Image (cartoon, rainbow, N blue to C red):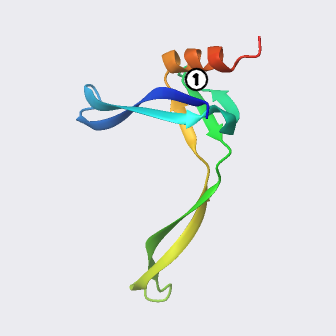
Amino acid sequence: MNQFFYTRKELVSGTPENPEFKEFRDSFNINKVVRTITMNDERTLVLLDDLHERAQEVPDIDPKTNKMRAMKRVKDTFQSEIYLDPSDAVRFQKVTSLD
């Protein structure tokens, strides 16, 4: 497997002026990359070829009364979208470039 390791930051607390993040070391298989997109803020969005279903419980609302009847299970299809910070994006491009 060709794993690419990158740093993912998750907002844990703070204010908009002073956010506090927790860092995680994650990876993905380079062979699953479908395409990349460079964002305006210099991050790179990596789209993976890993379509998968997720089921979740959601309220079943009666349209006539606008009240919840019960919970229902809804399935949705997702594709992994990974955002790379600019420094990780540069490393990713060096690793995957055909030049």
Amino acid type for the residue under numbered disc 1 = Asn
Q: Estimate the x, y position of residue 70 in percent, counting from the top left.
A: 41, 85
Q: Estimate the x, y position of residue 36 in percent, counting from the top left.
A: 67, 30
Decide which of 54, 99 is in the foreground and name it.
Answer: 99
The residue lying furthest to the top in this view is 99
**Which residue does the image show at 71% across and 33% down from the upper left?**
35
Relative side of 64 to 67, left or right = right
Decide which of 47, 94 is in the foreground and name it.
Answer: 94
Relative side of 12 to 79, left or right = left
The residue lying furthest to the front in this view is 1
The picture quadrant where one finds residue 20 is top left
Q: Is 28 drawn above or below residue 57 in the view shown?
A: above
**Which residue does the image show at 68% across and 45% down from the upper left?**
49
Q: Estimate the x, y position of residue 59 in percent, counting from the top left.
A: 42, 77
The residue to which callout 1 is attached is 40
**For the N terminus, which image quadrant?**
top right
